[in-house]
Image (tube, grey):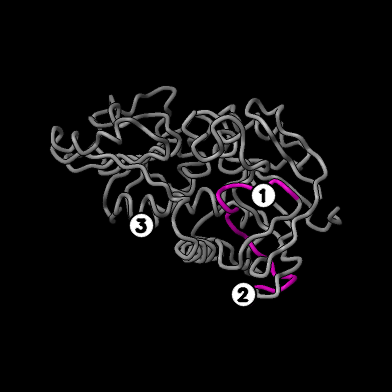
Amino acid sequence: MKAVVYSKYGSPEVLEFCDIPAPTPKDNEVQVKIAFSTVTLVDTAFRSGTPFIARLFTGLLKPKNGILGTEFSGVVDSVGKGVTRFRPGDRVFGAAPNGFGAHAQCICIGQDAAIVKIPDALTFEDAATICNGALTALPFLREGAGLKSGQKILIIGASGSIGTAAVQLAAAMGAEVTGLCSSSNLEMVSNLGATLVIDYTATNFAKTGQKYDVIFDTVGKSSFRKSRSSLTKAGIYLTTIPDPGVLLSPLWTVFHKGKRAKMMATGLRSDAVKIKDMDILKEMVIKDELHPVIDRSYPLEQIRAAHAYVERGHKRGNLLINIPYNRPLI
């Protein structure tokens, strides 16, 4: 099968498009021919080995897993003899095990892993975007923030894959949403449900005097220290990126009268919990309550260009990787 592999950390040039043997499903696994995957900031961090903390998951000196790709959509091609949840021909989407393996023509995944069927009303393209942005944003807002109707939330990186989902989900929860993004994305973020949108290139949100119950930094561009003054007395700062201030949050809670910070490793949640949220999110897309934002699509063989584009930091929503699932597997 065709796949993109890497054996060392570095620039997008370390990615190699090549032929490798297709995996065979074990008794409790399904083999999925992949139609679409994505390239995310997680992929670029795992590829480059930076920040260094990423290597705790990928290998200190060299990558332990040779194929990147955190999410996928496609068609079940074959199943192990113990599989009862799926059968060949099922359209499915899922989160790749441990965040690896989806930049290939096919993947084998346990039937009880984070994989669900795609309803007829949902496209492969939209389904492929759910397991990164929306599946990350939902638990941050629901469990991390305990977001309630009427609360004010600032979403930093509101135009990215997590941010575009977070804006819509927060608005659906009844929150008053302020989005922070570049000038070129102001209209898009507003249309997604933000009450107010701030151009970070022209305005420092921390200098506006506005207070928020929740600040959700989806891209790690701020910090708890920089954001504290913009939180209400019991406000919470959420981040997807490790921040020293988050580790010291219990102390800051004492000194700053309840203000606190939290980071969540949403990818480490159980597959059963992920499946429940995937079902919620796919229904929201079908009901037109959640709109996946897709910037552009690259064929698998142009994966280096896709990584370079994501690293430039101007991606709007999701970047798809097109992997025609009807090609023969080698």
Q: From mark 1 to mark 3, how far is it between C-alphas?
A: 32 Å
The x, y position of residue 304, in whole percent, is 71, 32
User: What residue did someone put label 3 on?
Assistant: 173
User: Is 327 situated left or right of 171 in this image?
Assistant: right
Label whose residue precedes the other's in the sequence (3 or 2): 2
**Residue occupying the point 48% across, 54% down:** 135
Amino acid type at mark 2: Arg
The x, y position of residue 210, in whole percent, is 25, 34
**Residue occupying the point 45% across, 52% down:** 268
Q: Tell me, yes or no, whether the two marked residues, 3 and 2, touch with CB atoms within 8 Å.
A: no
Outermost residue toward the top in this view: 202
Classed neighbour count for the residue bearing mark 2: other residues with Cα under 10 Å, few (<14), some (14–19), many (≥20): few
User: What residue did someone put label 1 on?
Assistant: 102
Asked if the magenta segment contains residue 94, the reply would be yes
Amino acid type at mark 1: Ala
Frontmost residue, 268 versus 277: 268
Label whose residue precedes the other's in the sequence (2 or 1): 2
Classed neighbour count for the residue bearing mark 3: other residues with Cα under 10 Å, few (<14), some (14–19), many (≥20): some
Segment tinted magenta in the rendering: 84-104
Amino acid type at mark 3: Met
